[in-house]
Image (spheres, rainbow, N blue to C red):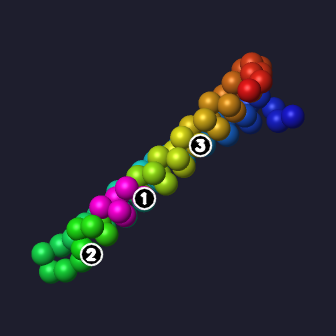
Amino acid sequence: MIAPKTNSLLSLVAAAAVLPLLGLYGLLMYIATPSPTGGMEPTVTTICYIAFTFIFTALIIVALNFSKQLSREAKGVYLTP
């Protein structure tokens, strides 16, 4: 068992991990966008947008659920799935 204060801190860290993910998502969207001087075809760009959106949505959901779980554990609330 981890101490409740440590769980509380780790909960905050897991929630804060979402911000770099959003930054990386924005950067990849910017890179995948075609520019006037060149870039990917519109079909490939759309596929990249959809793929990046699914991947980053899943990663953000996992990070937030883990943060919520650690927060509950810090409060002493244990929920079984």
19 left or right, relative to 36: right
**Which structural element holds mark 1?**
helix
Q: Nearer the viewer, residue 77 or 29?
A: 29
Question: Could you tell me how far apart the alpha carbons at marks 3 and 2 are, in whole angstroms?
Answer: 30 Å
Q: Nearer the viewer, residue 73 or 13?
A: 73
Could you classify mark 2 by the number of other residues whose Cα lies within 10 Å: few (under 14), some (14-19), or many (20 or more)? some
Q: Which residues are magenta?
A: 46-51
Residue sitting farthest toward the bottom: 37
**Which structural element holds mark 3?**
helix
Amino acid at circle 3:
Val
Report x, y in % for residue 57: 47, 46
Tell how many labels.
Answer: 3
Report x, y in % for residue 51: 42, 58
Q: The C terminus is located in which quarter?
A: top right
Within the image, what quadrant is residue 43 found in? bottom left
Q: Is residue 8 visible?
A: no
40 left or right, relative to 8: left
Residue underneath mark 2: 40
Residue underneath mark 3: 62
Above-or-below relation of 76 to 25: above
